[in-house]
Image: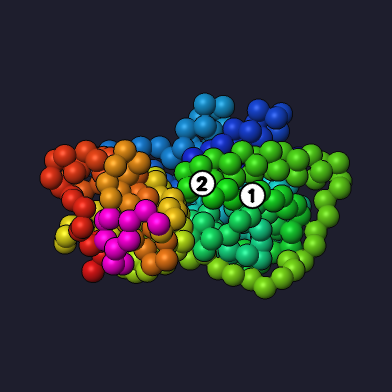
Amino acid sequence: MKIVFMGTPEFAAAHLKEIVESGNKVAGVFSQPDRPKGRGQKVEPTPVKTVATNYGIPVFQPEKINSDEGFEKLSELSPDIIVVVAFGKLLKSGVINLPTIGCFNVHASLLPKYRGAAPIQRAIENGETKTGITIFKIDEGMDTGAIALKRELEIHPSDSFGSLYLKLAELGKKTLVHFLERVKEGRLELAPQDGIPSFAPKIQPEDLVISDLSDAAKVVNKIRAYDPQPGARVSVEGRISKVFGASLKCRNEGKGIVGEIVKIDDRGMIVSCGAENVIISLVQFPGKKPMRPKDALSGRLISEGIILGG
């Protein structure tokens, strides 16, 4: 079975490494072009390209995959199956219909819930208690194809984007290996997506801002959803700052107006958020590294009684 893999970030790189280590031969890898990164804007290879290079797999990085040189290179490989994991480009009918078995995507949600670019963040932000991995056959819709495999995973109240990302990467790569084994054994079965769809659009800058601190659970979920990257934002006396490490705290320890820092101690800063309080363990002011609120208090960057937001 001739496999072509398409992917770009670390999440995809983990899957590529797993399927190669499991004995699957990958004929070629397609990844997005290398881009400048960081303050120095140094051009770095994509994580998927790095893994492919380490295993001696041919790598292609065309600007376009559905036409021109990209499609030509893909056609020359004559894949039996194309595996897509966080590739970052939509496939059109020419590519979708090219492999004899089909194109299959590894998606980090329980489809049809959270179709789109940011399923992990949106699930946490919305307070979901479970998510999972879905492998589906790609069609021309947005994550609408028939399902080949689905595996559930609990979202723990302490999970942030960072921890859930790692759990889903681990589940995803194991599910993908199992899927490829079933395909090779001729046991591929597909079922249409069942249920009411929901969507997980790409994260926009305004999504990161905590503008309403009146609902403690929503505040905690937003902070968890963007921790450790890119970080939820809140105004601290006019300074747009990032906050990390949020958890709920019962209301009987300090009560203030909505958004008020009622206490700062070794646990973090306790913020009044409606019926309950929220503990925030780290804060990052513009131009500075994340720090404990207690250290920020010592440095006179914050104080009890400050109102967040606004």
| Dot 2 amino acid type | Ser
For this orientation, the residue located farthest to the bottom is 196
Quarter of the image where one finds residue 146: bottom right
Write the residue at 69% across / 64% down. 145
Indicate whether 35 appears above or below 129. above
Secondary structure category for the residue under label 1: strand
Magenta span: 252-262
Q: Is residue 293 magenta?
A: no
- Report if residue 12 is visible in the image: no
Indicate whether 57 appears above or below 176. above
What whole-number distance in Å separates the C-alpha atoms at marks 1 and 2?
A: 11 Å
In the image, taking residue 39 as reference, residue 11 lies left or right, namely: right
Please state, as top left, top right, bottom left or bottom right, where the C terminus lies in the image: bottom left
For this orientation, the residue located farthest to the right is 186
Label of residue 216 in the image: none
Horizontal and vertical percent for residue 105? 64, 53
Residue that badge 1 annotates: 154
| Dot 1 amino acid type | Glu
- The one nearer the camera, 277 or 110, is 277
- The one nearer the camera, 29 or 279, is 279
Q: What main secondary structure does the magenta stretch of the protein show?
A: loop
Quarter of the image where one finds residue 12: top right
> Mark 1, residues whose alpha carbon is within 10 Å: few (<14), some, or many (≥20)?
few
Write the residue at 29% across / 42% down. 265
Label of residue 158 in the image: 2
Kindly report which numbered mark, 1 or 2, lies closer to the viewer in this rendering.
2
In the image, taking residue 187 as reference, residue 260 lies left or right, namely: left
Horizontal and vertical percent for residue 81? 71, 48
- The one nearer the camera, 62 or 303, is 303
